[in-house]
Image (tube, helix red, strand yellow):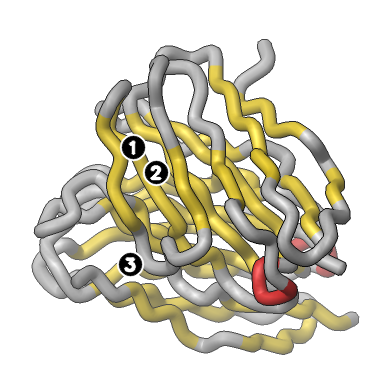
Amino acid sequence: NAGVTQTPKFRIPKIGQSMTLQCTQDMNHNYMYWYRQDPGMGLKLIYYSVGAGITDKGEVPNGYNVSRSTTEDFPLRLELAAPSQTSVYFCASRSGGGTEAFFGQGTRLTVV
Amino acid sequence: ELKVEQNPLFLSMQEGKNYTIYCNYSTTSDRLYWYRQDPGKSLESLFVLLSNGAVKQEGRLMASLDTKARLSTLHITAAVHDLSATYFCAVVNYGGSQGNLIFGKGTKLSVKP
C-alpha cells in the first residue's frame, strides 16, 4: 500500500553540492512528475515523464535533471545546488486513465 | 502553452456561508483535478472530473467541469472551519506538451466562526 514514496524527507545541502531526490511508485503508473513549491505558492512543474525512457521539461527545468530507466523510479538530480533551489519538492504519478494523480509526502530542501 | 488560473487566490469566509472557487484553463483538456493541501502537508485528492458536464460532490464540496468554456468550479456549501486549507485545480495538457499536469496558483481558504 505504498503509493508514491519520496526520499529523503529533509535535506540541507551546501551551495555547489550535487544531490539526488528519489521517487518510487508501485502502482505501475506511466506518468510521473516532479514539482517544486515555494512558501505560500503553487506548484511548478520541473520535469515529467510519460513512460520509461521518455522525459520532458516542464515550466522550471533549469538546474535540474531527471531520468526514467524503469517504470517505478523517477529520480531528480540537482547538479550544483543553489539557494534559489530551496523549496519543497513533490513527486506525483498517475495512470493514463481517469484516476487521480497521487503525490508523495514531499522533500524539504534547504540550500545553505 | 497551457495556463491555469484560479480565483480568488485568497478567500476569507464566515462559517455557514456559501462560495465558489473558479478555475479557468487555456487549452483543450477533459481531465481536471481538485486537490486540498493543509499547511506543511502533501496534496490530497478531492475530485477527478473527466468529461464535459461532470459534477461530483463530497460533503460540503461540489465540483463541476465545463470543457467548452474551459472552466471548473468548486462550490462550498455552509462552510465550516475544517474546510480551511489551500485548494488547487490541475489540468492535464493535451496540447503540445501532451501529458503534463499543470496547477493553478491555489486558493487559500480561511473559514472563520
Residue A51 in which image quadrant: top left
Please state the chain letter of the residue tagged with numbered disc 2 in the rendered image.
Answer: B
The residue tagged 2 is B48
Under mark 3, the amino acid is Ser
Q: Residue at 67% x, 81% y: name it.
A: B17
Q: Quadrant of residue A104?
A: top right
Q: Is residue B48 above or below residue A32?
A: below
Of B10 and A47, which appears nearest the observer? A47
Figure label count: 3
Marks 3 and 2, how far apart in space?
A: 11 Å
* Residue found 44% across the figure and 67% down from its top: A60
Q: Amino acid at mark 1?
A: Ser
Which quarter of the image is occupied by the C terminus of chain B? Answer: bottom right
Q: Residue at x 33, y 67 (%)?
A: B72
Is residue B55 shown left or right of residue B96?
A: right
**Residue type at numbered disc 2:** Val
Q: Which residue is mark 3?
A: B72
Judge from the rendering whether residue A61 lies leftward or rightward of residue A20; answer left or right.
Answer: left
Q: Comparing marks 3 and 1, which lies closer to the viewer?
A: 1
Closer to us: mark 1 or mark 2? 1
User: How far apart are labels 3 and 1 at the CA level?
Assistant: 26 Å
In the figure, B21 relative to A76: above or below?
below
The quadrant of the image that shows the N terminus of chain B is bottom left
Residue on which the image places disc 1: A49
Q: Secondary structure at mark 2?
A: strand
Sort mark 2 into few (<14), some (14-19) or many (20+) by Cα contacts within 10 Å. Answer: many
Chain letter of the residue carrying label 3: B
What separation in Å lies between label 1 and label 2 (alpha carbons)? 21 Å
